[in-house]
Amino acid sequence: MTNKLLVVDDEEGIREVLEITLTDAGYEVLTAENGFSGLDMVKTHNPDIVLTDIRMPGMDGMALLKTVKQTYPDIEVIMITGYGDANLAIDSLKIGAVDFISKPVNQDVLEIALKRANDRIRTREKLADHTRNLEILVAEKTRKLAESEKRYVQLFNESPAYITILDENFRIVESNNRFKDQFGDHPDMYCFQVQQQRKTPCDTCPVNETFADGHSHTAEMDVTLRDGRVRRFFIQTSAIPDDSGRIRHVMEMCTDITVIHQLQDHLAALGLHISSISHGIKGMLTGLDGGDYLIRAGLEKNDFQRISKGWDIIREKIAMIRQMVLNILYHSKDRTPDMQPESVFDFIQELVTTMDPRIRKAGIELILDTPKPSTDFHVIMDKTLLFGACLAILENAVDACISVATDRKKLTIRIQVDQTPDQVLFKIRDNGKGLDRQYRQKIFSLFYSDKGNKGTGLGLFIARRSVQLHQGEIHVDSVPGEFTEFTIAIPKKASDI
Amino acid sequence: MTKKIMIVDDDPAITKYLETLFKDNGFDTCIADDGKQAMDVFLDQQPDLITLDLEMPEEWGPRFFRKISKKGYTTPVIVISGLSGRTHSIPKAEAFFAKPFKADEVLAKVKAVLGV
């Protein structure tokens, strides 16, 4: 029940009757004799319902209604009309009165009008409550949504993978923090640009396949980070369709599997090693059988020459087995290089002597820009390891020249030795077929060879390992069709090793 | 007439072994150290049977076999190799012996193929 009610009427009798009746009905009743004093009462007491006569001197009921509704729209106003006020009564409803009753006031009609006013007040209150609840609910949901979004963004950014969202042109439209850290964060980046340093999309691309068929695809690729390091990535893709089902974006998730790949290399190397050892042992056993046969046959026939020959074979095979066992021990451990000061002049001379027959046979001019006896200096190195590395590069250089022998007027290989304050640089440059970037990235991988059946994919892999054992670096620079230059840089001081 | 066996292997210990084994059993022999030299020796000596290693420097066994087959020769070949997984390398070979082989088994096969 509404508590406060204001009666405005210029007739005192009516005010009194209504005050008594309404007080009995449970209202706190205020009264005013005209529109102005009624408005003052509204301002000071803020009643819930105003019951006002239409016709009053000064400010009449209609003016009061207008003012109240403009200023206090929640106050319900009931108009009291006299005979002939029907049109005014209807106008009052248009302005906002909840109802009107006519004089003389009928008790039942008054109750109905008050009930209507109270219903409207309650409905408004319910609506206000509902609106308040709704606002609270929306605020709560908004907070949860924001938290959830923040959480997903955090998961996206902190995921232990490199995540990008790509459009149909392979443009990176979104990427997580891990990706940005390693590849940069520039607008309008294309994945093939930042990951492969290419100007055009890759030939085989799992993203492209996902755009084509909507399925998830995988691939393994070598990618170059912002700092120039090359890492092996396992790539998985998934389609991100829009509401119509059309695939407008594809998510690419890359995991760095460099360590696993290195382990695979090691395992493969081990397998290869075992296979090679096994093959060698078979040959040696056959040789030992041969020696045994010759000795037995010699003993039967008293043929000393045979016995001697057989024994020679057995001795030779024993020596081979000894060497093989030493080799196995040499390769199976992380051995410390046998670092000794070596003359660069002697080193290069030995290298040239070893390779010269092949270089000469291929018609290649060898240019030496290396120390002479007068300018010779010593470098701390494991000569066997470094010699093997240089030999592998030279073998590649000769093959690269031979492959373009028919197109080149002059084939050259240049060996150069430079010094910096900290390093000694061995450079081997050929004007052979050259290597494109993709090959340059893979060239030091185990079993990678661009020489078809002629290459084992071992030479440069072992060369890099040998250089790494010197705490050194090996780089390759090349322009396809023009040249390839390998640089081995090893620290100069013995204390650096 | 004494049958002639050509031994092709890059390991001198093994060629000496087979040479002695075959000679002790009444065969003539001739030797080639690698696949390339094998062609010259083959054409010069015209052997009745070849024992052929697979993996050799310069030219590997199957290539030599293809070359003589192309020239129309049908000389029987017995493969003796450490590459035990390569029995299919010369499908037309009479037999494949993996190193280390058993001398009496090789000898028995040689005799069977040559019909002696």
Image: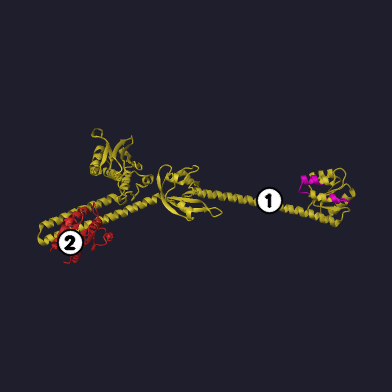
List the single residue furthest toward the top: A374
Dot 2 falls on a residue whose secondary structure is: loop
Q: Indicate the quadrant containing the N terminus of chain A: top left, top right, bottom left or bottom right.
A: bottom right
Indicate whether residue A252 is drawn in magenta: no
In this rendering, the label closer to the viewer, 2 or 1: 2
Dot 1 falls on a residue whose secondary structure is: helix
Chain shown yellow: that is A
Image colour for chain B is red
Residue A175 in the image, given as x and y percentages of width and height: 49, 47
Say which amino acid is labelled 1. Answer: Arg
In this orientation, does residue B99 appear?
no
Q: Residues within 10 Å of mark 1 (few under 14, many from 20)?
A: few
B105, A395: nearer the viewer: A395
A129, A247: nearer the viewer: A247
Residue B22 in the image, given as x and y percentages of width and height: 15, 61
Q: Which residue is mark 2?
A: B48
| Number of numbered discs overlaid on the protein picture | 2
